[in-house]
Image: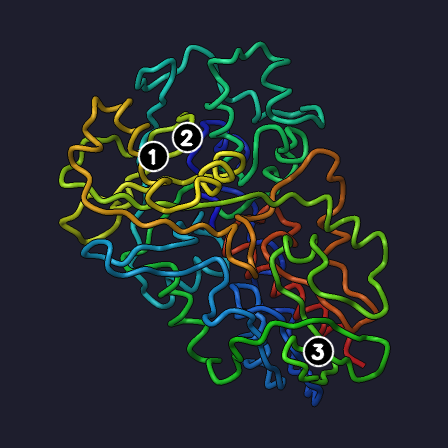
Amino acid sequence: MDRSKFLKLSSLAAMGWIIGPSLVACSKNTLFENPNYKGKVLIIGAGAAGLYAGYLLQSLGIDFQILEARNIYGGRMGKFEGLSDYTVDTGAQWLHGNNSILADLVKKSKTKITNDTSENTYWFQNQLVKTLPKDIEIFDKEGLPDISFEDYALQQGFGSEYKFIVESLAGDQGADASQLSAYWNHKDEENWVAGEDDFKFKDTYFHFIDQNIAQPILPKIQLNAPIDGIDYTVDKLQVKLKSGTILEADKVIVTVPISILKLNEISFSPALPTAKTEAFQKIGMGPGMKVFLRFSTKFYEDFVLGGSICAAYADDTVGKTTNDNVLLAFIMGEQAAYLSGLGSDAAIIQALLAELDLMYNNQASLNFLNGVVFDWTKEPYIKGAYGFSSVNMGDARKIATQPIDNKLFFAGEAMNINGHHQTVHGAVESAYKAVNDLILNLK
């Protein structure tokens, strides 16, 4: 999935997101020197972090191999053809900001993108409105308590009529309002330097990553290779695949989603330090789903926030060359869990159409052509959307990303400590940090 940045709060500019500090140190390759290293590195996972780690290692002349559990690389990025006359992004689709490693690569590769300037509309008390009676920017200020969005909204006098508006705020971060920390979410946001604007790709985000990062290292990616465990007690680390095959390496970079680490689906020998496993548990990651609905006409606004079935709907055709009308239902947290439990894609689509019919006087059912569901929670090697800042999270991200014994390194969007978690460019930055840590500590 990807952090969709549905909420464009005016105070972001005041925080310096438009003209902010220069790129974080890990976004430039100035720290790298040719290490002349002859060892072997295994990378676990071929999402954005794993692919970029491989890309960096190849540029440094270091031998590596990427092990990917699924039958396709890309992690929480993907594409789907056949719904409409353009290819849809099944996972990440917005490039957030123009000040990052990936934004630089977009410019260098002359990839075509479009600034998504869509305005918000709210479904509030059974009406579509452009403004709300109360200011929802309460979550964007200093001194917030370490309590959930839900509890803080109640504390500030927001009644039940704001429940799904608050859920849309939390859903933008991949969380339930009952789990997302007002304090830690804001602290993370303070570190954001990528820029405020959101961009859509003319093709797909997956296509951009594939062409510019994955294709140059394609021979080094082994698909259908889920791993069972990592033994780092010996000089040559041993990575055991579920097939029984054992591979040896001098270093291992783990880039799997935080959900997989939280569930202990990879065994480590010896067991990871308690502080690290506790850090994994403190980083949130909830259910996530995207549903694309194609209609014969556009009867809907560009963005609608506050639905009880889906808290965020967006016109998916922004930035695309198309004659079709496709609406994205971006669903997180308890709403994604509810829809996933309905048991079939048809039931999920019908539930969404019923809500849109309520908003738009039955126009959804009358104009519906076809739809497709992508339930990332049911992907066995992903199991969710992306990492969020949970209540009592503390410095969990910093602990989670720390190397172990100069042998094990960790990367992925949830490991980003510069405020760019939940994004593809944040995953890439974390890969840079992991490779940089590896290089600086070569023995």
The residue drawn where x is 61% and y is 42% is: 388
Give the distance between the C-alpha atoms of the residues marked 1 and 2, in whole angstroms: 7 Å
Choose the circle earlier in sequence order: 1 or 3. 3
Disc number for residue 309: 2
Q: Label 3: which residue?
A: 240
State the image coordinates of residue 367 (x, y, percent, origin top left). 16, 36
Can you name the residue that lies furthest to the front here?
Answer: 343
Q: Secondary structure at mark 3?
A: strand
Amino acid carrying label 2: it is Ile
Amino acid carrying label 1: it is Leu
Choose the circle earlier in sequence order: 1 or 2. 2
State the image coordinates of residue 159 (x, y, percent, origin top left). 53, 11
Q: How many marks?
A: 3
Q: Is residue 264 left or right of residue 383?
A: right
Q: Circles 1 and 2: CB distance less than 8 Å?
A: yes
The residue drawn where x is 56% and y is 20% is: 138
